[in-house]
């Protein structure tokens, strides 16, 4: 213990002694080392993610020229990305230093990550939403610095709602189903045979867990596994909600939706071929890009309410974590701290509509001008429903895999909803030792 305290104290003193540099944006940057180092960051490449991260890495290198940052592109689907990370971690591979990790992974990946608390001031940590900091803290260690947060939203075409005489986006899933069918029939009759009512994430992966939790929670006020560890997947309202979702496949949603990830849904919506889309905030700035056919023709709202009378948005989001196997943990931490800083979150919020995790940015006029719904839908982000990753850790990924596999079998018609959920309940009980 004494030794640990001594080491920590030395670290703090060394860090305090290192000169701060200033970025081109005017923010203070701490490079944490004056040694030459190379840092590889495993990052997402959904939408504009990769370009934005590369630009941020370039800004960091200007401020800390002794550190070279390389951004490694990783698979789009969260489940595939986790598979890659697990391979690297299990081999104790030191070739990747910084990992962009999902909000559901700190518990499952804890043993492979270092504590980042010594690299941040209390004030810097406290600037982020406390719930996300808490989520990322395992056994007192801050394993990921919050980078951006996510919540499921309904994207809808304002021009088409007006054309068909609707004055608001749907309030319930039933209303969504009817509106989608009416507009789809109308647009097809006018010759757009490619047009669909509703696109979403139906592939068997983590994204489907997010969509299905929204259907489930809005219908039944239950959430896969409750915060106190009760398994809650098998109930009438959830069965009915999943049956409704299955009825969309091949009617208001393309038959191929059961193979869709985020980018597939965005592809259809952004090309002008869907009325509604369930997706994350990143799709907003891309949809409004100059070359987008739907620029200025859509808006976002909370997802519709289910039988429980409530709307639900699944909480998502990503953090920057440093691998325990990194050979340059100080340089890696410097990169993680910089990428998640106020100035970088501001750039991502404005250029990519990525929701900041730093609360003050929700009052920043530049951010609100670029992405007005950060203000108007603030409550949706604050009240988003968490997946049961903390309560089931380190088995969350297995819980989610059982869940999305069961939901997928309902969507494809392989399994009856009531049977699938009864079996799921048994499988979860076995996995969690209940
Ligand atoms: C988004 C969310 C993440 C979620 C993933 C599922 O990236 O931020 O939390 O797991 O989508 O596809």
Image (spheres, rainbow, N blue to C red):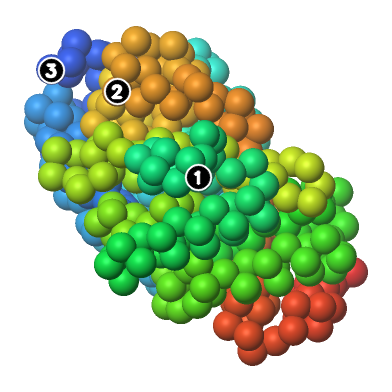
Residue under the point 34% across and 45% down: 283
Image quarter of the N terminus: top right
Nearest-to-viewer mark from 1 and 3:
1
Assign a secondary structure to mark 1: strand
Nearest-to-viewer mark from 3 and 2:
2
Q: What percent of the width, then of the height, locates residue 331?
A: 27, 37
Residue 308 showing in the rendered view: yes
* Of pointers 2 and 1, the one earlier in the residue sequence: 1
Q: What percent of the width, then of the height, locates residue 68?
A: 13, 42
Verify CB contact (< 8 Å) between mark 3 and mark 2.
Answer: no
* Of pointers 1 and 3, the one earlier in the residue sequence: 3
Residue under label 3: 24
Residue under label 1: 154
Residue under label 2: 370
Residue 138 showing in the rendered view: no
Assign a secondary structure to mark 3: loop
* Of pointers 3 and 2, the one earlier in the residue sequence: 3
């Amino acid at each position: 213990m004494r030794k640990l305290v001594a080491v920590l104290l030395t670290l703090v003193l060394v860090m305090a002694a290192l000169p701060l540099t200033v970025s081109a944006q005017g923010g203070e940057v701490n490079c944490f080392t004056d040694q030459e180092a190379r840092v590889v960051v495993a990052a997402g490449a959904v939408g504009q993610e990769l370009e934005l991260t590369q630009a941020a890495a370039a800004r960091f290198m200007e401020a800390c020229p002794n550190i070279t940052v390389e951004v490694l592109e990783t698979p789009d689907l969260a489940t595939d990305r986790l598979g890659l990370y697990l391979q690297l971690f299990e081999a104790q591979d030191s070739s990747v230093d910084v990992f962009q990790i999902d909000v559901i992974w700190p518990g499952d990946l804890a043993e492979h990550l270092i504590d980042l608390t010594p690299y941040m001031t209390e004030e810097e940590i406290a600037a982020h939403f406390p719930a996300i900091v808490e989520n990322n803290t395992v056994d007192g260690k801050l394993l990921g610095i919050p980078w951006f947060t996510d919540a499921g939203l309904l994207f809808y075409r304002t021009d088409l709602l007006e054309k068909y005489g609707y004055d608001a986006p749907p309030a319930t899933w039933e209303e969504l189903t009817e509106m989608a069918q009416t507009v789809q029939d109308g647009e097809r009759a006018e010759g757009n045979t490619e047009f669909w009512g509703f696109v979403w994430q139906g592939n068997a992966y983590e994204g489907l867990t997010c969509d299905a939790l929204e259907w489930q929670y809005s219908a039944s006020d239950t959430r896969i596994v409750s915060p106190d560890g009760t398994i809650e997947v098998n109930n009438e309202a959830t069965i009915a909600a999943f049956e409704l979702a299955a009825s969309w496949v091949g009617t208001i949603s393309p038959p191929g939706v059961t193979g869709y990830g985020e980018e597939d849904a965005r592809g259809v919506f952004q090309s002008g071929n869907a009325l509604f889309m369930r997706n994350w905030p990143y799709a907003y700035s891309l949809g409004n890009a100059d070359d987008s056919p739907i620029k200025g023709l859509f808006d976002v709202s909370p997802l519709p309410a289910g039988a429980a009378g409530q709307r639900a948005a699944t909480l998502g989001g990503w953090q920057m974590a440093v691998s325990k196997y990194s050979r340059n943990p100080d340089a890696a931490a410097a990169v993680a701290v910089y990428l998640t800083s106020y100035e970088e979150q501001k750039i991502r919020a404005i250029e990519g509509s990525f929701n900041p995790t730093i609360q003050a940015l929700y009052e920043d006029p530049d951010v609100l001008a670029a992405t007005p719904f950060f203000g108007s839908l603030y409550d949706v982000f604050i009240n988003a429903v968490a997946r049961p990753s903390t309560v089931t850790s380190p088995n969350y990924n297995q819980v989610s895999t059982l869940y999305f596999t069961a939901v997928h079998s309902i969507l494809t018609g392989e399994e009856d909803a009531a049977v699938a959920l009864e079996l799921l309940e048994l499988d979860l009980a076995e996995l969690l030792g209940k």
